[in-house]
Image: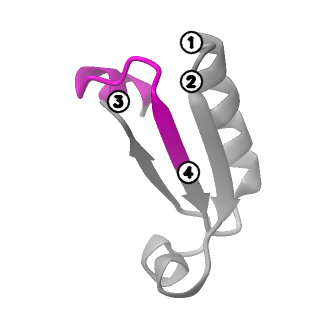
Amino acid sequence: MLGEMENLGYNGGKVRIGHCQNAALTLELCTEIRQRFPKADVRSYPLRGLCSYYAERGGIMLGFES
């Protein structure tokens, strides 16, 4: 996923990651982003409502600045 983010122009800006009962994957992804881009503004949160329905259990939704 990080490779695709970089292909799309990500170089250390804002990243928002919502997870549907998958905090472990989210933590791993946040850690990797911070290692590659120390100045990145990375935040994660549990999804609720309609977003959790679309992400499904174990899924994530990710948005970033490019």
Residue type marked 3: Met
Who is closer to the viewer here, 57 or 12? 12
Q: Is residue 48 left or right of residue 27?
A: left
According to the picture, the residue beneath numbered tag 3 turns out to be 5
* Residue 22 occupies quadrant: bottom right
Choose the circle earlier in sequence order: 3 or 2. 3
**Residue positioned 30% across, 30% down in the render:** 66
* Residue 49 occupies quadrant: bottom right
According to the picture, the residue beneath numbered tag 4 turns out to be 17
Residue 13 sits inside the magenta stretch? yes
Determine whether label 4 and label 1 are within 8 Å by CB: no
According to the picture, the residue beneath numbered tag 2 turns out to be 40
Residue type marked 4: Ile
Assign a secondary structure to mark 1: helix
Residue 17 sits inside the magenta stretch? no
Choose the circle earlier in sequence order: 4 or 1. 4
Over which residues does the magenta segment extend? 2-16
